[in-house]
Image (cartoon, coloured by chain):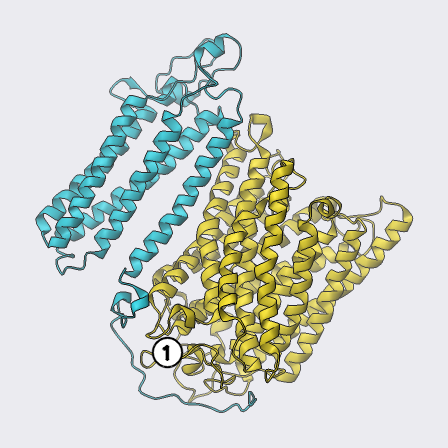
Chain colours: A yellow, B cyan
Amino acid sequence: MSAAASPVPAAPSGSPLSYLNAERGLLSWLTTVDHKRIGLMYLVSTLFFFLLAGLMAIALRVELWTPQGDVFDPDTYNKLFTLHGGLMVFAFIIPSIPASLGNFLVPLMVGAKDVAFPKLNLWSFYIYILGALVLLGAIFGGAMDTGWTFYVPYSTAPSKAGPGIVFSLIGVFILGFSSILTGLNFIVTVHKMRAPGLTWMRLPLFLWAIYATAIIQVLATPVLAITLLLLVLERWFGVGVFDAALGGDPVLFQHFFWFYSHPAVYIMILPAFGVISEVIAVHSRKRIFGYKAIVYSSLAIAFFGFLVWGHHMFLSGQSGIASTIFSFLTFAVAVPTAIKVFSWLATMYKGSIAWTTPMLYALSFMGMFTIGGLTGVFLGALAVDVHLHDTYFVVGHFHYVMVGGTVISFIAGLYHWWPKMGGRMYSEFWSRTACAVVFIGFNLTFVSQLVMGSKGMPRRYASYDSVSPALQETFQFWHQLSTTGSMILGIGFFMVAGTLIWAWVKGPRASGNPWMGLTLEWETTSPPDQHNFAAVPAVRRGPYDYV
Amino acid sequence: MSAHEAVEHHGDDDHHHHEHRLRPEEWPSEPMVGVASAGKVGMWWFLLSDALMFAGFLLAYGILRGGSEIWTCTQELVEAGKCLAPVCSDFAMSLGAQCQENGRFLEEPALGINFTAGLTFLLICSSVTMVLALSYCKEGDRKNTVKYLAITTAGGILFLCGQWYEYFGLFGFPGLIESGLAFGHSSYATTFFLITSFHGMHVFSGVVYLAITTWQASKGRFDDGYTSEVEILGLFWHFVDLIWILVFTFIYLVPNEHGV
């Protein structure tokens, strides 16, 4: 938080009064109910956990450079990948776009002064901080070694992990409430706070995406909450809900967990779709193709997302008929997703495309997310999944969607709205360079994982020296490629951070509307006034009616 | 495009620093936005979220119960050697539980339907008084609003007392814990305590919420005709009531085919 706050007083004298300097001092930040400041505080905190969990990923990749388990003992390795996954999913990706960009942009885009419940908004930030710290603090209780999915019986077996597992579960439980409250706030804001003339069908697509996300946050997260609660009770009291030895049902845990966690991947990717819709329309200067199709496909994804959880359990003793139905429903999700990708492509067709950094990220998103989505179809196919289940193919697929999809579009959104947030422009040359480094590093890291996974390399193994020498050599080749890629990717992310920090502190001043966007956030100053708009804005056209 | 013309753009200097935050419904009206207050929309979505929590609990209960060989460990089943009665905990013994010489209860008790049916009726009545309170509030009748809000609060408190009696017993009558329903001993006991206490926490929150609103009403907060906050409280209270009817049906009324 202070990292975001400190550059502000350093701004040269005569800088216009904005939300950044209207009130001064650390306390004015910590007690603020301004959605823009809360958005920035979320940004800094989520990126801190991204950094932390990213460094853990590098450590994991280093371990896999050689087939032997030589850097970490298997126990530490298990704890590392678990913490990497847990922090990335619950403390970074889920809150990333909605809580930072969403908090900053939702009231601006609807033309309001703030979200519907500003104090609740600050509460959800502190609940987030508490949850993330408890999750991280589990290290001191022996951490957790179950994988981020907390599967029973790993999580119920009397393990060496001590209280670490319970700490982690409680941390995620708390984080869930932050997510619910943020989602609730956004839903009500979109329902009730729209400026005159901003009808549902004039909403920017980013708002539609956040709205669809919020519905999932509000409806799916409570199920995770009770699942984790039951798991904690199972560990403490042996209540016999999930533990088969006590008459419980371990598959019930998987059902409950994925009832939340599959919709949760749409919590992670839908906001990314929103960012990409904005970036592509604005930087192609063209009316978005298929506005309504994109809107309804967002809602369709939110709806179908609730009906596909069983595809995580093809090999968990689920009945054949259930698996078949889940498999077909999974394919059904590909339809609205493809509608979006084709709409973006058609938007770019004959547009005046500006090759700005946000646009470059949007383009890399389209390629990488498509790979992520299509590999998902492989995994949704029953027979193929038997072969690929629990291999690096799954890891590759997941990272193509989460990093190639969400993180890349998060960065696209940061560059796109950075002039609005900080009032200053980034260096186009260095930002494009960083984009290229990220693109190369990312693909090197995760294409290798897709390949080695299809060759049979299982996930979550600290060593792979027990297979035949020929296979060992193959695996090692791809692992080394992947590790090299992860280093490049890491450098790329640091370059991104460098360009953004430089822009915030030293970049040239940006105008109120550097991209000539038509949505409401561009109608106010950069950075916006504390109260967003001098007068209530009126909307008389669609969000992408370029002439 | 001229993205990089970093033009310093000073906006209008007449920034209005509004001291008074508008209530969302005072925002310029828009036909598509509707008339429900932000708080009401928020409460509805919160209740949906909360409903999914109960749905999860009840589903877990249904799956565990449907998949179990023996759900309630009755005395006949204990004597037939089909299951072991719960271990007498120190806590239960301090309540005066009747234990066998082997340190176990005689059986797992069945749930008393009649008494809890009375509690259910009480909760439904408190929903009626809640409706009356809101209706008087809308008429601007402060005295009757406070009266019926207070009666509703009392209904909630009585329900909690009933639940206390059911768990721990009162006036020498044994509670379920004393009779052998031991949390953690069986899925039957665990799900019973989890779900009913989770609901009980909702009733408790509702009682606190009701008490605060009653106090506010007595101070004349709703005399200006802005009654949305009472209506929102009503939504929550009716929801807690509705959930109880589901809990009562599934936990108490569904007959025990395996056990008896």
Residue drawn at x 12%, y 58% is B223
Q: Position of residue A26 (x, y in %)?
A: 42, 70
Q: Residue at x 10, y 55 (%)?
A: B140
Query: What residue appears at the point 53 percent right and 27 percent down from the top-left corner?
Result: B67
Judging from the image, mark 1 belongs to the subunit labelled A
Is residue A124 shown left or right of residue A294?
Answer: left
Q: Nearer the viewer, residue A298 or A508?
A: A298
Q: Position of residue B225 (x, y in %)?
A: 15, 59
B155 vs A128: above or below: above
Quadrant of the rendered image containing residue A49: bottom right
Residue at numbered disc 1: A539
Let me know if residue B128 appears in the view.
yes
Q: Name the residue type under label 1.
A: Val
Residue A152 vertical position relative to residue A187 in the rendered view, above or below: above
Towards the viewer: A103 or A158: A103
Please give left or right for residue B241 compared with residue B145 in the image: right
Percent position of residue A527, x then y? 44, 80
Image: A318 above or below B34: above
Q: Give the quarter of the image for residue A430.
A: bottom right
